[in-house]
Amino acid sequence: MTEDKERLDRAIMAMRVAKELPPGGTVNLGIGIPTLVSMFVGDDSIVFYHSESGVLNCGPLAEDGNEDIDLINAGGQFLEPVPGMAYFSSADAFAMIRGGHVDVTVLGAHQVSANGDLANWMLPERGVGNIGGAMDLAAGADKVIVAMEHNDRNGNAKVVEECSFPLTGKGCVSLVVTDVAVLEPTPDGMVLRETAPGWSPEDVQEITGAALIIPESVGEYEV
Amino acid sequence: MAFSKLYDTHDAAVADVRDGATILVGGVAKSNEPSGLLSALLRHDATDLTIVCDFSGWDGSETIPRLVKDGRVSRIISPYPFLGAHGGVIPELWELGDIEVVAVPHGTLAERLRAAGAGIGGVFITTGVGTRFDMDKESRSIDGVGHVLETPLRADFALLRCHRADGVGNLVYRGAQRGWNSVMATAARTTVVESDEIGEPGAINPELVITPGIYVNRIVRAAGAPAV
Amino acid sequence: MPLTETSAFKIARRAAREIAPGAVVALDRGLPELVARVTPESMGVWFLRADGTLNGIPLSAADAAAIVRGGYVDLAIVHPAQVTADGRFVGRLYARDASIAPPGIGVDLASGARRIIALHPQINEDEPEICLASHLLERPVDGVGGIDRVIADCAVFEPQGTEFVLSEIATDRQADDVVADSDLSEVVSISDYPAAMDFTVPSGTPESKVHADGASALHDLPDGVTVFIDGFGGPGGMAHYLLMSLRDRGSRGLTIVSNTAGIARVVSFGTPPGRTAIDHSVLIENGQVAKAIASFPVSPSVSRPSEFELAYRRGEVDLELVPQGTLAERLRAGGAGIRAFYTPTGAGTLIAEGKESRTIDGRDYILEYGLRADFAIIRAHKADINGNLIYRGTSRNFNAVMAPAARVTIVEVDEIVEPGQLDPEEIVTPGVFVQRIVKRPDGFTGYE
């Protein structure tokens, strides 16, 4: 039974994702858990942040009293001004993304399929959704990391054989970090790489909607 | 700093240019020219190069004609592959079949570079329809108007010149220096820039940055520029 | 016979008379550059040069070419080697073989400029640097059917299909002599009454772009047009005052193109307590919007629907959902004369349905089209009276992309300054893209 098992919190997930960011690389963080990732990048690892609102090398969220409506991230939140920023238009912001200049993007998701399809822009029951920059990031970033809870509020699996929700991109996800596991979509199927403390591969399989490929050695979720 | 884009010498900044490389050169005249990087390229032994530039032999600059004379260049892509009534070394070698010359309209070259940098697979434009520049290209009529498909032009290296760089690779140019340098910065796998001045992050007002650091891999001080 | 300074200046002055005040004029290298020197500054002409500068404002090579291809050049002045009677031309620069002759910017100008005139330095058979021809000799063309006037120092010729007509003659010359002396009789006929060439410097001033208020700036915005309106997540970058002016004007059946379809009010980032951010909702509530083209059309929160989402559920508005980068690129394409482009974004998704798909070098792409509009309502920080703009921070994002893609771009700014008060290096949007300027009234906050 997996119901009683403890799941990792969002901060731990963000810390796990932070390990994936290449020193000197450029990173675009989506809204939600991904936004937390920047808090866990060590001072010795220089990472450049890109926001599709039109700013590069941007800093953390603005401190109280420092809000400026002309300095925001993609979610409309205010940013703290930091040295080394550059402003540009939306055409340039997305030229950077599509052109392969963003090394890593971290996105939330509704569903990820075994071969790396991503669905994160619309819940079918709403009938309308926001694409925003997600499709461009899915198509353009060198590496797409999904950070999400393993199951939705109703317990449905978000790692699935095939996405039933409208796609954001096909075969674009290279790593999935959830609150119980780290998984790698491949053309052959979803490979289980790491499990959270107290979780066996079989436990993870039980709450996953895709048949996992379980290698001989599955690592411990490392942060 | 655990990570730096700064290089000590021009030679180090172009050391990994390999035979057969495609190289964008941001300017070949006066202050637009990455003269230190081009001199380092002259000292280098890479051959079979493709050079993409605005002018390939403009007043005063001997760099690219010299590369060509040395037999290092197999292809020139340019809106002005040569100038003047007699043209110099490039048309001579072209007549001998030693070099390929690809003449491209100015704006089409700029857009092909921009497309490469922006992840665009191709653009349909009207430039050159009905002229010598629509030969061998895919064409289609859109709303009754003839268009040709122009494809992205990607490069291995861009050798550029700017006025000021900060430590994270944000660049500003001076005047017409911006023209080709800023477009080429986006289109190469490795962008190397030679700067008159190099400052700390924050040395450039974020409103004034023309080339954001995301495009810049290596920065080296311009030949003859004073240390800052 | 070499070109004398006198004849060059005469040609340049006559050419300058082709220019309307405030026009955008592209100059090829060489003799055409002289036209800028003889044109009075008071005429407010925008000279785009081959080095990528626009009245001294430095542009990237891509942006300079976009001005030409995007249809912003009213007049191009070239100096070709040959012009045919049907308006084709070949470039001026010598080449031993046509296939490697330098095209320079001539080909771009031929395709993109609304009008092209050729400068013809001197008619002299011994110096066939330039010639008029009934058909081209040897070399394939650089420009097709574009030249509508050829200006020499003693006469003006108009290509009329199968022959040229000499339409103007210098007062000290005889038309018959000019044609006979230069061996042009086979290709030129002389107008019955050739006008006297006028070499005096032109004059005139452009219409002011500055409008006193929003009502004046939007006075001709009709029902049923497409309007670009910036709007990201928060209140930054939105032309709040002009949005209220558009509401007051009441134009209906509008298609709005915007990143969001108005979510600042429900997201309420930065909104002072007790107040409401002005966004697209003011138009939707007023029944003015028929359709939105947007990437982020509805509230991020299901429980706080925006006015647009409510109207959409009531079936009152249509929606075309576009990925944000595709929206930005379609606008950029619209302004840059790119009719269509292949993008990887959305390949294999709902967005690709009904669109051409294509695999290029192993990557999947879909074909998207450029987007243009009749009007853009944008927000900038400062404008000079010529319409050159600078923005503040991330509020540049869609504003700077929309400005070049609309026929009439109307900007709301915090401050209007005199020419020269903005550093050319800091100008983001050159004034050629801006038709009307309105200062946001003092004390206007962007909140209701």
Image: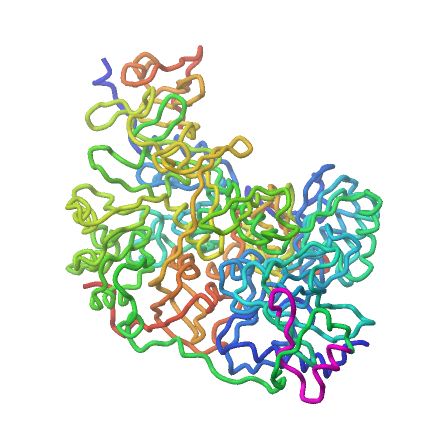
Of residues B223 and C218, the one drawn nearer to the viewer in this rendering: C218
- Occupied quadrant, residue C415: bottom left
Is-magenta flag for residue A166? no
| C286 in relation to B191, above or below | below
Q: Which residue occupies 37% across, 58% down?
A: C373
Residue C329 point in image, percent of width and height: 44, 49
Q: Quadrant of the N terminus of chain A?
A: top left
Q: Is residue B166 left or right of residue C395?
A: right
Of residues B34 and C164, the one drawn nearer to the viewer in this rendering: C164
Q: Which residue occupies 77% across, 63% down?
A: B59
Tell me how many marks there are. Answer: 0
Q: Which residue occupies 24% across, 47% down?
A: C318
Residue C6 point in image, percent of width and height: 72, 83
Residue C125 point in image, percent of width and height: 80, 72
| C45 in relation to C425, above or below | below
Q: Which residue occupies 43% across, 67% down?
A: C389
Q: Quadrant of the C terminus of chain A?
A: top left
Of residues C227 and A26, the one drawn nearer to the viewer in this rendering: C227
Q: How is the image coloured?
A: rainbow
Q: Is residue A189 left or right of residue C113?
A: left
Which residue is situated farthest in the bottom direction here? C172
Residue B100 point in image, percent of width and height: 75, 44
| A140 in relation to A211, above or below | below
Is-magenta flag for residue C175? yes
Q: Is residue A15 visible?
A: no
Of residues C17 and A104, the one drawn nearer to the viewer in this rendering: C17
| C412 in relation to B187, above or below | below
Q: Which residues are magenta?
A: C159-180
- Occupied quadrant, residue A176: top left
